[in-house]
């Protein structure tokens, strides 16, 4: 599960960077919002699945 979330996170970040090369139009804004939401969701999922460090 964690590996899948890492792959999704990396793919969404790459997609967000690639979207910056597009022209500014409605599609660009919509895809950028979706990419940002995917980054936030996968980051939150990874944060929830983390293991606490035990001293």
Image (tube, helix red, strand yellow):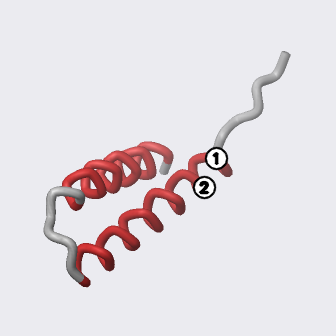
Helix, strand or loop at label 1? It is helix
Q: Measured from the top left, where is residue 44 in percent x and y?
A: 60, 55
Query: How many dots with numbers?
Result: 2
Whether pointer 2 and pointer 1 mark residues with C-beta atoms closer than 8 Å, the reply is yes
Q: In the rendered image of this protein, does residue 14 appear above or below residue 53? A: below
- Label 1, residues with CA under 10 Å away: few <14, some 14-19, many ≥20: few
Q: Measured from the top left, where is residue 21 in percent x and y?
A: 15, 57
Residue at the right extreme? Answer: 55
Residue at the front extreme? Answer: 24
Residue at left 76%, top 25%? Answer: 53
Left or right of residue 54, residue 13 in this image: left
Q: In the rendered image of this protein, does residue 33 appear above or below residue 43? A: below
Q: Nearer the viewer, residue 40 or 4?
A: 40
Residue marked by disc 2 = 44
Left or right of residue 1, residue 27 in this image: left
Q: Nearer the viewer, residue 55 or 17?
A: 17
Q: In the rendered image of this protein, does residue 39 appear above or below residue 52? A: below
- Label 2, residues with CA under 10 Å away: few <14, some 14-19, many ≥20: few
Residue at left 23%, top 57%? Answer: 20
Q: Nearer the viewer, residue 11 or 21?
A: 21
Q: Measured from the top left, where is residue 52 in percent x and y?
A: 76, 32
Residue at left 57%, top 48%? Answer: 46
Residue 55: quarter of image = top right
Residue at the top extreme? Answer: 55
Helix, strand or loop at label 2? It is helix
Give the spatial CA distance, label 2 vs label 1. Answer: 5 Å
Q: Measured from the top left, where is residue 47 in percent x and y?
A: 64, 47
Residue at left 66%, top 40%? Answer: 50
Residue 15: quarter of image = bottom left
**In the drawing, what numbered circle is on residue 47?**
1
């Amino acid at each position: 599960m964690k590996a899948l979330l890492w792959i999704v996170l990396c793919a969404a970040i790459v997609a967000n960077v690639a979207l910056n090369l597009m022209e500014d139009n409605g599609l660009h804004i919509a895809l950028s919002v979706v990419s940002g939401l995917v980054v936030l969701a996968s980051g939150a999922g990874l944060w929830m699945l983390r293991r606490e460090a035990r001293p």
